[in-house]
Image (spheres, rainbow, N blue to C red):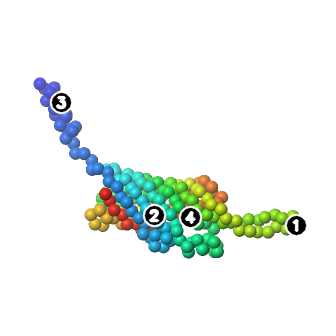
Amino acid sequence: MKKHLLFLFVGFAVFGQEKPSKPHYEFRTNLLTMLSQCNFNASIEKKNATNYSFGISMGTTQSSSLESKFKDGNTAYLAQWDVTPFVRYKLSTSNRSFYFAEAFGSINQGKYKEITRTPATTSSFYQITTGSYTAVALGGSLGYSLLVKSNWTVEFLVGFGSNLVNTQHSPAVVSRVGLSLGYQF
């Protein structure tokens, strides 16, 4: 009889525990780069009951002014798209407003131009050559997130990374800067 009561008590203790809150998702878009660079960037993040969360961000640039600066000006690189998976760690204890640190990887693609020297039989000449690059970067960011109203969030993020692959034709530094508006569900 005592064994049955012990099993019943242990069963209630195990199954009667409060389950952790369900993980939820947050979708956000970067308003700062959308307005300043015509760069559309969207992110989805899965938030867990722990201080860690992870997600993916995708962006594309469609700016005629950046294209003309690349074509006619002295801009050497024109980023066209990127896919950025990230992992975040919440540094504050509040769920309403908190600071976070982020580690990210980035697969980025774009165009480059460079001045090359072409040897000829009697003399050499210089010309501008263009091409495309695909690179992989690793980096880190710091940010602040604020829950504004029920499920709406505002986020500020600043971070930098370095391209590790195809470094001859890609930019050395990849930035991750934004002021984003998000919705949790």
Which marked residue is nearer to the observer: mark 1 or mark 3? 1
| Amino acid type, residue under disc 2 in the picture | Asn
Percent from the top left, x then y, of residue 151?
29, 62
As drawn, is 129 to the left or to the right of 30? right
Q: What separation in Å lies between label 4 and label 3 (alpha carbons)?
A: 63 Å
As drawn, is 86 to the left or to the right of 173? left
Task: Find disc 1 in the rendering and name its residue.
Answer: 122
Query: Based on the displayed image, in which of its 4 quarters is residue 76 positioned?
Result: bottom right
> Mark number for residue 7?
3
Which marked residue is nearer to the observer: mark 4 or mark 3? 4
Percent from the top left, x then y, of residue 162?
56, 58
Q: What separation in Å lies between label 1 and label 3 (alpha carbons)?
A: 95 Å
> Mark number for residue 79?
4
As drawn, is 131 to the left or to the right of 84? right
| Amino acid type, residue under disc 3 in the picture | Phe
The answer to whether residue 62 is above or below residue 21 is below
User: Marks 1 and 2: CB-CB under 8 Å?
Assistant: no
| Amino acid type, residue under disc 4 in the picture | Ala
Crowd class of label 3 (few under 14; some 14 to 19; many from 20; radius 10 Å): few
User: Marks 4 and 2: CB-CB under 8 Å?
Assistant: no
Circle 4: element type: strand
The answer to whether residue 146 is above or below residue 105 is below
Crowd class of label 4 (few under 14; some 14 to 19; many from 20; radius 10 Å): many
- Which image quarter holds the C terminus? bottom left
Percent from the top left, x then y, of residue 63?
53, 71
Circle 1: element type: loop
> Mark number for residue 41?
2
